[in-house]
Image (cartoon, rainbow, N blue to C red):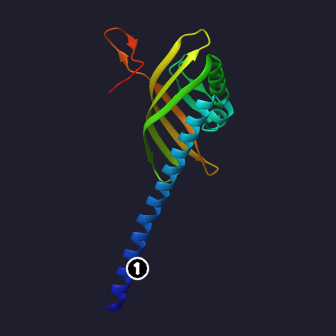
Amino acid sequence: MRRIEIFVVAVLVLILCGLSAPSFGKANDEAQIRALEQSFQDAFNAKDLDAIMKAYAPGDQLLVFDVVPPRQYVGFAAYKKDWQDTLALFDGPITFVLSELSVTTDGHGLAYSHSIQHMTGKLKKGDPVDLTVRVTDVYKKIKGKWLIVHEHVSVPVDLDTNKPDLQSKP
């Protein structure tokens, strides 16, 4: 009878250890992704192209659906060029705020998030920009570091006017 009790206790300990380890890993993964997104926000506000690109996976494994043409950017180099062109449009500071960030991790090296991102600034031609977008990111842990491998940026469209809703309020 004593062996059965020891066996049951041992199984319970293994189960509890097994349940707690992934949840800690997931919390740590989420914290790392939140830090990545904070670094991205800081880099965008600083208009620091190299720091912005530190959030993205290198090579051709990156795929981005952005709000500006073309429909998609395949690879790190193509998306870096898009960022370079975008930042060159602005005169003076950009104010970028990432909010409503929700992060989900699987505990095995994949994660996704969604957020609302708001940007204001002034174009070199003098026009103000006030834009709110919805962003979904997919992350992969590559060599121990979380990086974005897929990004989808969108704005809602008013189907009565066929115009984008650039302020995107709930």
**Is disc 1 placed on a helix, strand or loop?**
helix
Q: Is residue 17 above or below residue 133?
A: below
Name the amino acid, label 1: Ala
Which residue lies at the image location 56% right of the left edge and 38% below the top edge? 148
Q: Is residue 18 above or below residue 93?
A: below
Q: For residue 3, what is the image quadrant?
A: bottom left
Which residue lies at the image location 62% right of the left edge and 16% below the top edge? 89
Q: Callout 1 environment at 10 Å: few (<14), some (14 to 19), or many (20+)?
A: few
Which residue lies at the image location 47% right of the left edge and 64% below the top edge? 21
For the residue pair 4 and 76, the one nearer the viewer reads as: 76
Residue 147 percent location from the top left of the image? 58, 42
Q: Quadrant location of the C terminus? A: top left
The answer to whether 153 appears left or right of 90 in the picture is left
Name the residue at the front extreme. 92
| Residue for badge 1 | 10
Residue 33 percent location from the top left of the image? 52, 45
For the residue pair 62 and 4, the one nearer the viewer reads as: 62
Which residue lies at the image location 51% right of the left edge and 52% below the top edge? 29
